[in-house]
Image (cartoon, helix red, strand yellow):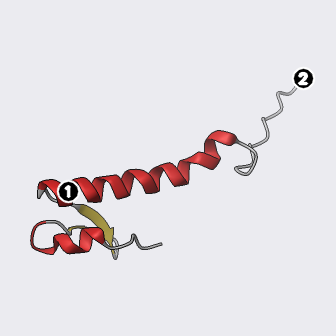
Amino acid sequence: MTASKPKPTSPSRDPDLLKVSPALRRAAQNARELALRTGTPCHVWRDGKMVNIGGRDQARCRARPRR
């Protein structure tokens, strides 16, 4: 008897997976807003590198995230 592999769940049908992307976007936006309010660093990935857009460039924290 061979054990069959479970079929991968389609992301469009799994209610938890459907909520991941919007939740990550909300978390990122909240982090940028918190950094702006408190004057703390705001690190993001840009061109394959982690960069701080806080401090002198805090106005960029308000910018809409790149997609």
Secondary element at tag 1: helix
Q: Is residue 46 visible?
A: yes
For the residues labelled 1 and 2, the Cα–Cα distance comes to 57 Å
> In front here: 30 or 17?
30
Say left or right for 46 vs 26.
left
> In front here: 44 or 27?
27
In the drawing, what numbered circle is on residue 35? 1
Q: Residue 21: x and y, percent?
A: 54, 54
Say left or right for 57 vs 1.
left
Q: Is residue 49 visible?
A: no
> In front here: 61 or 4?
61
Q: Residue 53: x and y, percent?
A: 20, 69
The N terminus: image quadrant? top right
Look at mark 2 in the image and give the residue it sits on: 1
Number of numbered labels in the structure image: 2
Say left or right for 25 vs 37.
right
Q: Amino acid at mark 1?
A: Ala
Q: Residue 13: x and y, percent?
A: 76, 45
Secondary element at tag 2: loop
Say left or right for 67 vs 49.
right
Q: Residue at x 62, y 45 (%)?
A: 17
- Is 16 drawn above or below residue 32 in the view shown? above
Q: Residue at x 71, y 42 (%)?
A: 14
Find the residue positioned furthest to the top. Answer: 1
Q: Amino acid at mark 2?
A: Met
The crowd level at tag 1 (other Cα within 10 Å; few <14, some 14-19, many 20+) is many
- Is 64 drawn above or below residue 16 in the view shown? below
> Is mark 1 in CB contact (under 8 Å) with mark 2?
no
Q: Residue at x 86, y 27 (%)?
A: 2
